[in-house]
Amino acid sequence: MIQDEVARLAADLGRRLVEAKAVVATAESCTGGLVAAAITSIAGSSEWFDRGFVTYSNEAKMAELGVPPDILDTHGAVSEATARLMAEGALARSAATLTVSITGIAGPGGATPGKPVGMVCLAWSKKGASTTVVTRHFAGDRTQVREASVVAALEGLRSRI
């Protein structure tokens, strides 16, 4: 069951963050705060979770995370460029040492040429390291795309501690 996997990943993330004396923050669009919810479902997460930014609209991405309007105009909200700036903006605007961002098309609508339903861009930014960005294509309905995005985000955080 996906909930069990998410809970296991979040608990393991917490253990690793405590050992590393690290703190995480999230910047989420298509997942609407699901990564932050998974993290904060773990008892004691206040020790290693600073905050979650839910920036669903372009206006929120600009206001909360500092994504420039020209990036959104040129590349779109669902792009590696936007994901990178979301993760870096969350790092700059929080007490976190590690961040993850997610922006994508969960469906069922919203697809455009070259950006199908299931396309999700994720980025991880860490103090003192370069930002990593990936584009993934997840199969399934809206719920499945969002759940797969949460798993990918948590796995990526764990691997970057």
Image (tube, rainbow, N blue to C red):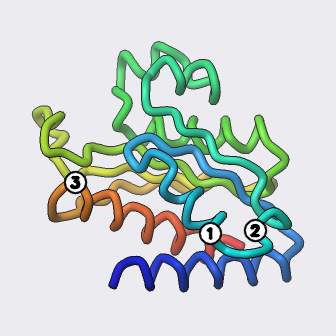
In screen coordinates, is 120 left or right of 158? left
Would residue 130 be visible to someone looking at this image? no
Q: Quadrant of the C terminus?
A: bottom right
Mark 2 Cα-neighbour bin, 10 Å: few <14, some 14–19, many ≥20: many
Residue 132 x/y as whole percent: 55, 56
- Closer to the camera in the image, 157 or 31: 31
Q: Amino acid at mark 3?
A: Arg
1 and 2 marks in contact (CB < 8 Å): yes
Q: Which residue is mark 3?
A: 142
3 and 2 marks in contact (CB < 8 Å): no
Q: Which residue is mark 1?
A: 41
The residues tagged by marks 3 and 2 sit, at their Cα atoms, a distance apart of: 27 Å
Q: Is residue 2 above or below residue 99?
A: below
Looking at marks 1 and 3 on the same chain, the residue that comes earlier in the sequence is marked by 1
For image coordinates 35% across by 65% down, the residue present is: 147
The residues tagged by marks 1 and 2 sit, at their Cα atoms, a distance apart of: 8 Å
For image coordinates 41% across by 77% down, the residue present is: 3
Q: Which residue is mark 2?
A: 45
In screen coordinates, is 112 left or right of 68? left
Q: Amino acid at mark 1?
A: Ser
Mark 3 Cα-neighbour bin, 10 Å: few <14, some 14–19, many ≥20: some
